[in-house]
């Protein structure tokens, strides 16, 4: 369908840039290494995330990681199916592009989780990972860590003496990647510009559900 051309291109471009940057980071920086791009507020800082957003995990070991990756795969399939069905009911390319951003972001991190454990050696604070190491990767299939690198400590300072907490503080501490940013941008675009479409499809889904149950 022609109306899906731009969303597909947008998703492909996000995935391509996301993976190129992650592979470069993984094979050129050791864990915890940083490059200051714009002073102290825009930093490329290499970390790896075993869990979900902000490092949330469901426990230690391989099984929780495999379950999380499997959930991400199922979620991405559902999103792709939803985008295809939505494309048959709307001509809004912006709405479809927003959905494509979310799908591409999910798939970008899924690629890390599925393949990176097999494709790369272990990253450490003293050494850079090797691509396709002779001794094998650092983890099994579906157990790879997601590569994160964007760090924006926009405001830094110290708590005042009268404040109940002591020491330094930073505003916006999360480290994220292009895939995470794509998901965030896609969600915000839907909420800011396409709420009517969201409500329309919600109503259509409710009506169709009521018809099938009668």
Image: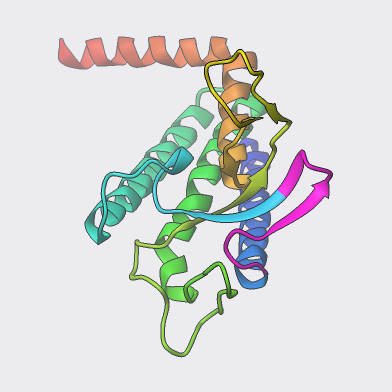
Quadrant placement of the C terminus: top left
Give the percent coordinates (x, y) of residue 35. 75, 56
Residue 211 position in % (x across, y down)? 24, 12
| Residue 38 falls within the magenta-colored stretch | yes
What residue is at 37 percent from the left and 38 percent from the top?
A: 78
Q: Is residue 91 visible?
A: no
Instruction: Find the residue positioned furthest to the right.
Output: 38
Q: Residue at x 65, y 60 (%)?
A: 33
| Residue, far front | 161
144 relative position to 5: left or right: left
- The x, y position of residue 207, in whole percent, is 32, 9
The span picked out in magenta is: 29-43
- Say which residue appears at 34% left-offset and 68% top-offset: 141
Q: Nearer the viewer, residue 120 or 182?
A: 120
Which quadrant holds residue 77? top left
Q: Quadrant of the N terminus?
A: top right
């Amino acid at each position: 369908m022609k109306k899906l051309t731009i969303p597909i291109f947008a998703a492909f471009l996000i995935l391509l840039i996301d993976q190129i940057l992650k592979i470069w980071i993984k094979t050129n920086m050791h864990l915890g290494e940083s490059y200051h791009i714009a002073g102290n507020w825009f930093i490329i800082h290499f970390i790896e995330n075993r869990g979900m957003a902000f490092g949330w995990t469901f426990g230690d070991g391989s099984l929780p990681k495999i379950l999380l990756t499997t959930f991400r795969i199922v979620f991405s399939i559902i999103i792709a199916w939803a985008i295809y069905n939505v494309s048959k009911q709307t001509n809004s390319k912006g709405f479809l592009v927003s959905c494509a951003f979310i799908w591409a972001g999910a798939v970008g991190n899924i690629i890390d989780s599925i393949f990176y454990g097999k494709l790369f050696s272990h990253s450490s604070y003293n050494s850079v990972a090797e691509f396709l190491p002779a001794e094998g990767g650092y983890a099994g299939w579906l157990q790879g860590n997601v590569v994160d690198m964007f760090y924006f400590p926009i405001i830094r300072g110290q708590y005042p003496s009268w404040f109940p907490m002591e020491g330094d503080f930073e505003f916006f501490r999360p480290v994220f990647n292009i895939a995470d940013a794509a998901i965030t941008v896609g969600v915000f675009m839907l909420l800011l510009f396409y709420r009517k479409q969201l409500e329309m499809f919600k109503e259509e889904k409710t009506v169709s559900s009521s018809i099938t149950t009668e």
